[in-house]
Amino acid sequence: MDVFDLRKQIVQDYANFARSFTRVRADDLKRQIDEIYAKDQFWPEPLLQITPYYERGASLDELAASGEVTSTTASIFRVPDEPELPLQLHTHQVQALAAARQGRSYVVTTGTGSGKSLCFFVPIIDAILRAKATDKTKKTRAIIVYPMNALANSQMEELEKFLKHVQPAQPITFARYTGQEGDEERKSVAANPPDILLTNFMMLEYLMTRQDATDQQVIGHCQNLRYLVLDELHTYRGRQGADVALLVRRIRALLAPEGLQCIGTSATMASGSTEDRRTAVAAVASKLFGVSVLPSDIIGETLVRATNPNLHNDSVKNQLAPAIEAGLSPSITDAELVLHPLSIWIETRLGLTWEDAKWVRARPQTLQTAAQWLSEDSGLAHEKCSDFLRQFLLVTSLAEADRSGGHNTGKRGFFAFKLHQFISGAGTAYATVETPGKRTLTVNAQQFLPDQPEKRLYPVHFCRDCGQEYHPIFLELGAQAQVLPREIDDVPPTIKRSEESEGLDRPQYGFLMPEPQDSQFEFSGKDEDYPDAWLEEDRHGDIRLKKDARKNKAERIAVEPTGQIGSGTYAWFIPGKFRFCLNCKVVHSAQGKDKNRLAALSAEGRSSATTLLTHSVLRWMHSQESIPVDRRKMLGFTDNRQDAALQAGHFNDFLFVSLFRAAFLGGRKSCWR
């Protein structure tokens, strides 16, 4: 599967979609907008990240033999679909198990795909099994809080995979209670308290405060709660973070008077050295958990090399060019990759970096940056390095069994990698008020043109029918009359226009339309140029504006690039709301918002943007016959209010796509991974 091709299609589809909403009439503005889009600043080249290898710890069978976990725990957590094999833990998972057994609250801050959920499920299930051996009371002993219902649903599936081979005797029970369950399911949870309850923080808040009998029964079974897990700890920030911190304190006071062990999982929450990161995460966890969490209670990842540890990118420089010239066999084995010069270069240049006397993740880089580095180290052309690097990553991301046609047993890609794609809409454009052809347009929100600070910048919106440009402005009169920019929704509560005065005798809000310099523009400001519905005949039979339409009459003024009125570029000032396009004569009613009548560069909404991204991925998947159906997986949702749990989220919207062994995360002003 060519994930780079997928990215290309998605970006092209989104670019076409985002640009389809806005028509631009003026040639000079259209040219500048095209130049801005051509720079790809709204959908830049994705960041490439190599998934590292984690240091292996003991297997659960070995831990059971030493008494660190029960034999039942070891029998539950087997290799999925191969229950005869014991589950091999990573070092950080063993460390989490040790921290849990000591009763300390802790946070696991390892990367995606590192098995963070096992860092709390294994110790919690083991502790519950030990507790149930002496106390048969049916009650909920652990609550797992997810920031999104989708994560709770996914974890339900994972638990079912582990427990399916120990059926029908279920040593551990679990249930979901997130607000998406029907009445019968809710009553079943209330009548049969699970050992582990999966929920979101909003539903847990409701359970603590509602008077509904079913909810009270569910939370009543949580008395003497032992464990509380906050998954994706980094999503609880700001107001939601304060809400969650207070919720944890209420749970501690009302449900766990004998003590509550809190566990968190998180992506990286701080930068700096390893110790600095641990200190920062410990401070956040202490505030959320309501207990002291020490830096030593922050469990990070321990990474190891997949390639020959005695070699690194500098030591294989002279071997890179011959290796690239020789090409890459699509059936290359893992044993060959361990010694391959480019494997060593990729791992130690792109995947890992040596810091604080250990290997840590390297910062993501674009493919072109990586290719430039490879070109410098190998002495080969940039384009050749880019093509080979792309091919190498696609081949080595496959499992060895897929590379060899099933002759080998390796099920993990040697170099699994991710592409992080950031996508955003262009938002609002800003332009100077000057003669068409001389004005400057930018998409950077600022008040003045950086290289000519005497020139003001004004937001630009376009008629949805003809593409004529308009600037939302305030007209300020006085000793120095001037035009000031405003956002299109920035409307004063009351603005009155003097009907006795011929001119503009007080500050006004409205729109400024630079006068087009072409013969197709026919508006002259005469009463007969306005819509028929705005006109009437006077007693002499002459056409004039109706009394209630006179407040919308446009006036021709001259404006300098500084905003001063009196000389400069001629423009038409339209007071009040946008009711009438002077170019195409389209009329709008008094009701409604101006931002729905005039288009910015980006007019797509969250739901429509996510729908487009999802459709693009699905269309691409259906065109790839080489991808088995059982390896296609996608989860997409948008709007942080559609799901109660998302109120704690930090994404504007989110699209997660997992295809084969490559993953993307996408959303407007967000990212794909």
Image (spheres, rainbow, N blue to C red):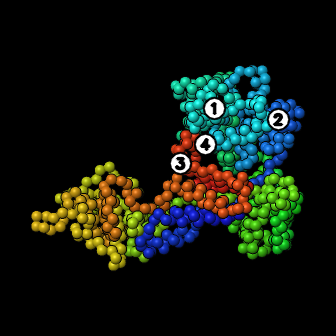
Q: Which residue is mark 3?
A: 639
Q: Mark 4: few, some, or many residues within 10 Å (few <14, many ≥20)?
A: many
Is 124 left or right of 536, judged from the image as shown? right
Helix, strand or loop for disc 4: loop
Residue under pointer 1:
290
Task: Using the image, tell me which numbered label, if any, was put on residue 148.
Answer: 4
Q: Is residue 205 above or below residue 648?
A: above
Quadrant assignment, res 564: bottom left
Left/right of residue 148 with respect to residue 379 in the rendered view: left
- Label 2: how many residues lie within 10 Å, few (<14), some (14-19) or many (20+)? many
Q: Residue at x 82, y 44 (%)?
A: 82
Marks 1/4: CA distance? 23 Å
**Which numbered circle lies on residue 75?**
2
User: At which x and y percent is residue 629?
Assistant: 70, 55
Pick whichever of labels 1 and 4 is earlier in the sequence: 4
Q: Which of labels 1 and 3 is toward the front?
A: 3
Mark 2 or mark 3, which has the lower sequence index? Answer: 2
**Marks 2 and 1: CB-CB under 8 Å?**
no
Q: Earlier in the sequence, mark 1 or mark 3?
A: 1
